[in-house]
Amino acid sequence: MPPPPSFRYNQRMDNDNIARIFQKIARLLEIKGESPFKINAYDRAAESIRIYPDPVAEMNSEDLKTIPGVGQAIADKIIELSTTGTLGFLERLQNEIPVELLDWLDLPGVGPKTTALIWQSLHITSLDELRQAASEGKLHSLAGIGEKLEGKILAAIPSKTE
């Protein structure tokens, strides 16, 4: 379920948390099928922010743009996060793409394209629904997913009784 419009991040906006937010954006953009250049920009910015020695949340726009991988758009997002505790761009992405799909990326053989294919074809969003679809043989009917991958997915998702 997407966060309500007034959602605020509970964690401190330190470099590590800001980097995690940008990595989350990159993964959601991958599932959405966005340009690899845009995805890489968020990944690059996340890594630069994570290792940056000073707190980026305390920097102004011009200083932020001196960080490798941080341009005006990313600098604006950092400032929005640090001043409001929210990020409208991420909230809009989460309204388009169920955030639960990010858990699927941890499954063997399941990347962003496979995640998007299953989600859009079968209209499922939870790991429980994915396990059920795999156990019913629904996944291997999709282009690019064979019985072997379906079995790997099923084996990787713990059942509720485990």
Image (cartoon, grey):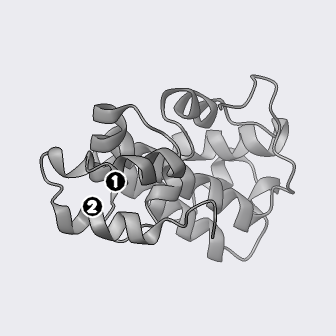
For label 1, the SS is helix
Question: Do the residues bearing badges 1 and 2 touch, measured as CB atoms within 8 Å?
Answer: yes
Residue at 24%, 65% in the rendered image: 149
Amino acid type indicated by mark 2:
Glu
Residue 37 percent coordinates (x, y): 30, 51
Q: Which mark is residue 4?
A: none
Of the pair 98 and 133, the residue shown nearer to us: 133
The correct choice, above or below, for 79 with respect to 104 in the image is above
Give the amino acid type for the residue marked by disc 1 in the picture: Ala
On the picture, is 37 further left or further right than 7? left
Percent across and percent down for residue 97 are: 48, 34
Q: Secondary structure at mark 2?
A: helix
Q: Position of residue 57 (x, y in %)?
A: 78, 54
Q: Residue at x 46, y 61 (%)?
A: 43
Q: Which mark is residue 150?
A: 2
Q: Based on the displayed image, in which of its 4 quarters is residue 52 positioned?
A: bottom right
The residue wearing badge 1 is 134
